[in-house]
Image (tube, rainbow, N blue to C red):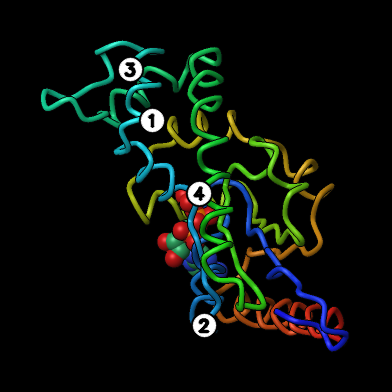
Amino acid sequence: MVSRAGLVLKPYLLAVTGGIGSGKSTVSHYFAERQLPVLDLDQVGHLLLTEEDVKLALYLQFGADICANDGAIDRGKLAARCFLDSAAMATLNGVMHPKIWQYVLQWMDAQPNEKILVIEASVLIEAGFASRVDGVLVVMADRAIRQQRVALRDCCSEERFHQITAMQCSDASRRAVADWVIENNHDLLSLRTKIEAVYNELLNRVRGALT
Ligand code: ATP
């Protein structure tokens, strides 16, 4: 985008983050409905697992145990290998996080005329991406509510939920980098009202940069 002074500005990059089941995807869908381009970094991670250089890097780190018969990375095996082993998880992240960020940069470069771009990033803080974005929207909900919602959504067991939350950063560290916090403990209508308020503030912020 170009300011009135003729300066070429990059699109404003908003990150949506939060704990498991907090409502990140629901919030991101709202932005997509408003025609903002949205990139889900979990999906980027899955896509990158099919790329040859990533496959090779992971194969060299973890060996053939993480591969399916056809040589593809088996996500289930990879997750099982890294899930309860923090050193293995750090190794996996060391391969994936730089690749994911590289993908984000290419995605941004491909749409220089957009005013606002949104990434949905569950690992924003853990991956060290928070300082690289222009704004952070944290979605929060009480733990019991999140657990109930993901159990309903995809039969996530209590044990699995606890394992995932144990690997994720704290609400306090999310709040520390937040430009906006949306509490999502009530119904979808209430959530929508809060997102609309953030969306309007976001537009004002970007308009401000253009004047
Ligand atoms: P994950 O961390 O697993 O990727 P997420 O943070 O993206 O999850 P969502 O998938 O958006 O969370 O929400 C979890 C579930 O809760 C979904 O089924 C969603 O439809 C539902 N949900 C989200 N917000 C609300 C709400 N306010 N009221 C009722 N259900 C909700």
Measured in 3D between alpha carbons, the distance from the residue under mark 1 to the one under mark 4, in whole angstroms, is 13 Å
Q: Nearer the viewer, residue 152 or 70?
A: 70
Label 4 sits on what residue type?
Tyr
Measured in 3D between alpha carbons, the distance from the residue under mark 4 to the one under mark 3, in whole angstroms, is 21 Å
Q: Position of residue 120 (x, y in %)?
A: 56, 57
| SS under mark 3 | helix
Q: Is residue 24 above or below residue 79?
A: below
- Residue 199 lies in what quarter of the image? bottom right
| SS under mark 4 | helix
Label 3 sits on what residue type?
Tyr
Where residue 54 is drawn, which disc sits there?
1
Measured in 3D between alpha carbons, the distance from the residue under mark 3 to the one under mark 1, in whole angstroms, is 8 Å
Residue under pointer 3: 59
Residue under pointer 2: 35
Q: Which residue is rendered at x = 29% and y = 29% of the image? A: 76
Q: Estimate how packed mark 3 is, as few (under 14), some (14 to 19) or many (20 or more) residues with alpha carbons within 10 Å.
A: some
Measured in 3D between alpha carbons, the distance from the residue under mark 2 to the one under mark 3, in whole angstroms, is 39 Å
> Within 8 Å: ligand 1 and the Cβ of disc 3?
no
The mark lying in front, picked from 4 and 2, is 4
Left or right: where 179 falls relative to 59: right
Label 2 sits on what residue type?
Gln
| SS under mark 2 | loop
Q: Nearer the viewer, residue 141 or 43?
A: 43
Where residue 204 is drawn, which disc sits there?
none
- Furthest toward the left, the residue is 69
Q: Position of residue 45 (x, y in %)?
A: 43, 42
